[in-house]
Image (cartoon, coloured by chain):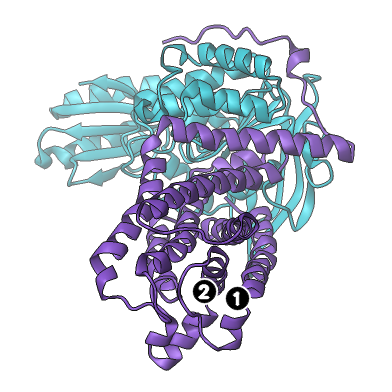
Chain colours: A cyan, B purple
């Protein structure tokens, strides 16, 4: 595919369920060879949009093209150009990994010999060659997902849809899936990724669309998106609760606006303008005030904060899931105090 | 960890094949249907327990009913209860088979396998054709096992070879109708609870027939329902074709069992085939 061309195009897509619009004028343009993240809370329309683009659902209005083919009129051509990885590993649990891939190869109309060759090639590429003969019941969550990716790459399609590919995976498996996705992007595959985790979009996506109530409400690179709610934040955890007021006063001298204090976790949080100078300033100010800090961390806004800012609704799963929750394990650049 | 650099096959070998003529579509529909059937048959080899269980269950039922309850049973018009029972169990085996259809279809749908198939450049019909062929083969196998069991406990097919063949054909026709009912119900299922319900309902629906006892022994209104149960027509028809004992009754429906053993399954197909196709096309997940 021409690298300057558009791999996925949606114009004014609408989809109605009863009297509710799941999609209400959804627009999207994904340049070929890029990874585009679709972020939004539950029920925002992420899965519906992927459903229409992958020919599973019929739109009630608007139009869409995938790999240059109209999804409504040229469904067969679209299906020959895409791979879909849904929210569950959509593979046969009884068959072995290799038997799965040979079956999918045959259903993609490869000859028996070509299907076997392609299966071995994919098993090796996704580092499943050692376990290819085992039944899937013995696979870990990450292995299952990698096989799922492999099954969607049988024809090396130019466009790949990933619908929340790491939901429910442990951090290690999540890393494995990210690695596998990056390796596909390196070969020129265009990826449309839906996720609830900002960290995931951060790791993989060149550009992100934030979607709410069936419409795109913000677009940009992950960095642009985060800076829209006001840059970095600093968290300070003090050792003793009675030092909270002194610490808050010290932070206020250095930070852009009034810090928020959380007594239960002994945490003070504030927005900062310049990350590195702010960190040095806060360490000095806390020192001068005689406050013993247990932890000081500079971090990016979390997904929850981005959504609260953009949509006024917090995501249901982000808090406490550990993936992109309050402590921001991945986005955080921690300094142990 | 690192993932090895991809060494994709010759791109030309991976070029998608899109069927454009009706003949090419038909050829791929057959090839894809066979691939999905092979998947079902591979399940038998890799997990024989499920198949063995489904073959053994009707055998167990026929032995239980034949020997635990058989002594207390009166066959209307006289005769050996086990000879009366075996044709009923043939029909019940077809009903139990529907439970397997529902389970398999629901599992594929709920795991997203059906969605994956629907986004692939394969023939959409292959998903259901493969299911239907696998389930028909499994039911044919179950019939053969039960046939042998019947012969071992004193049941016989007294009719001509033609009548016996027709009886087996009627049983498979019923199973074919239940494939479509099973596919439709499976596509409706949201979780395992529904499947348990279908498997539980098989018993009252199967028992409310002339399979185990004559409807004339039930309370009047219940007996009428049992007579009009589509399964009863197949039970009476195969009992007649096998020349087994048991007077069906004087009612119109009992007197026209052979006709109705064709009509009922055709009606079931006419209802559930379009429903299944519509449901399959409009699946949202």
Tell me the SS state at disc 2: helix
| Residue B212, percent from left and from top | 39, 71
Foreground disc of the pair 2, 1:
1
What residue lies at 63% left-to-right and 59% top-to-bottom? Answer: B166
The N terminus of chain A - image quarter: top right
Residue B110 visible in this rendered orientation of the protein: no
Tag of residue B14: none
- Residue A319 in which image quadrant: top left
Tag of residue B232: 2
The residue nearer to you, when weighing B242 against B140, is: B242
- Give a yes or no on whether discs 2 and 1 share a subunit: yes
Whole-number angstrom distance, CA of label 2 to CA of label 1:
8 Å
Establish if A259 lies above or below A328.
below
| Residue A199, percent from left and from top | 45, 31
The C terminus of chain A - image quarter: top left
Tell me the SS state at disc 1: helix
Q: Chain of mark 1?
A: B
The residue nearer to you, when weighing B149 against B158, is: B158
Q: Which numbered disc, 2 or 1, marks the residue that appears first in the sequence?
A: 2
What residue lies at 47% left-to-right and 29% top-to-bottom? Answer: A95
Q: Report crowding for label 2: few under 14, some 14 to 19, many 20 or more residues within 10 A (C-alpha).
A: many
Tag of residue B257: 1
- Residue A106 in which image quadrant: top right
What residue lies at 56% left-to-right and 44% top-to-bottom? Answer: B137
Viewed as shown, does residue A47 lie left or right of A272? right
Viewed as shown, does residue A251 lie left or right of B223? left
Residue B252 visible in this rendered orientation of the protein: yes
């Amino acid at each position: 595919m021409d690298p300057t061309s558009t791999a996925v195009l949606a114009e004014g897509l609408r989809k109605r369920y009863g009297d509710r619009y799941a999609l209400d004028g959804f627009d999207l343009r994904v340049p070929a060879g890029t990874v585009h993240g679709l972020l939004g809370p539950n029920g925002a329309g992420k899965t519906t949009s992927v459903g229409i683009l992958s020919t599973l659902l019929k739109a009630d209005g608007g139009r869409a093209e995938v790999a240059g083919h109209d999804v409504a009129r040229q469904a067969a051509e679209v299906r020959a150009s895409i791979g879909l990885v849904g929210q569950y590993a959509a593979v046969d649990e009884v068959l072995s990994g290799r038997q799965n891939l040979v079956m999918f190869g045959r259903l993609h109309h490869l000859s028996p010999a070509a299907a076997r060759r392609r299966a071995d090639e994919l098993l090796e590429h996704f580092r499943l060659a050692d376990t290819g003969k085992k039944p899937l019941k013995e696979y870990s969550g990450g292995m299952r997902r990698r096989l799922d990716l492999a099954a969607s790459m049988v024809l090396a399609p130019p466009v790949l849809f990933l619908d929340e590919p790491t939901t429910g995976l442990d951090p290690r498996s999540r890393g494995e899936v990210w690695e596998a996705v990056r390796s596909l992007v390196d070969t020129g595959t265009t990826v449309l990724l839906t996720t609830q985790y900002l960290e995931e979009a951060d790791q993989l996506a060149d550009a992100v669309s934030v979607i709410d109530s069936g419409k795109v409400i913000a677009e940009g690179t992950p960095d642009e998106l985060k800076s829209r709610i006001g840059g970095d934040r600093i968290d300070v955890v003090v050792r003793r609760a009675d030092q909270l007021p002194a610490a808050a006063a010290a932070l206020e001298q250095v930070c852009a606006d009034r810090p928020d204090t959380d007594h239960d976790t002994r945490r003070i949080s504030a927005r900062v303008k310049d990350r590195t100078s702010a960190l040095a300033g806060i360490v000095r100010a806390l020192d001068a005030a005689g406050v013993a800090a247990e932890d000081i961390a500079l971090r990016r806004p979390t997904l929850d904060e981005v959504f609260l800012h953009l949509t006024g609704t917090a995501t249901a799963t982000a808090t406490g899931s550990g993936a992109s929750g309050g402590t921001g394990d991945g986005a955080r650049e921690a300094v142990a105090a | 960890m690192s993932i090895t650099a991809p060494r994709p096959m010759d791109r030309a070998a991976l070029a998608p094949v899109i069927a454009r003529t009706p003949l090419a579509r038909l050829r791929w529909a057959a090839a894809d249907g066979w691939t999905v059937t092979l998947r079902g048959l591979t399940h038998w080899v890799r997990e024989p327990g499920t198949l063995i269980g489904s073959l053994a269950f009707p055998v167990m039922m026929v032995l239980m009913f034949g020997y635990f309850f058989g002594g207390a049973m009166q066959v209307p018009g006289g005769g050996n209860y086990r000879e009366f029972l075996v044709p009923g169990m043939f029909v019940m085996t077809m009903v139990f088979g529907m439970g397997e259809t529902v389970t398999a279809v629901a599992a594929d749908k709920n795991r997203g396998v059906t969605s994956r198939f629907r986004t692939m450049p394969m023939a959409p019909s292959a998903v259901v054709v493969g299911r239907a062929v696998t389930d028909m083969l499994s039911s044919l196998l179950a019939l053969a096992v039960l046939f042998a069991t019947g012969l071992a406990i004193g049941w016989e097919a007294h009719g001509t070879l033609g009548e016996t063949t027709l009886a087996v054909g009627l049983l498979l026709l019923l199973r074919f109708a239940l494939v479509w009912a099973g596919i439709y119900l499976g596509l409706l299922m949201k979780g395992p609870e529904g499947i348990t319900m279908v498997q539980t309902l098989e018993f009252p629906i199967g028992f409310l027939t002339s399979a185990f006892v004559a409807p004339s022994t039930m309370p009047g209104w219940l007996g009428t329902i049992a007579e009009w149960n589509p399964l009863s027509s197949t039970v009476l028809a195969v009992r007649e074709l096998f020349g087994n004992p048991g007077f069906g009754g004087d009612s119109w429906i009992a007197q026209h069992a052979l006709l109705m053993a064709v009509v009922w399954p055709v009606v079931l197909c006419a209802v559930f085939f379009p429903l299944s196709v519509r449901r399959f096309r409009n699946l949202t997940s």
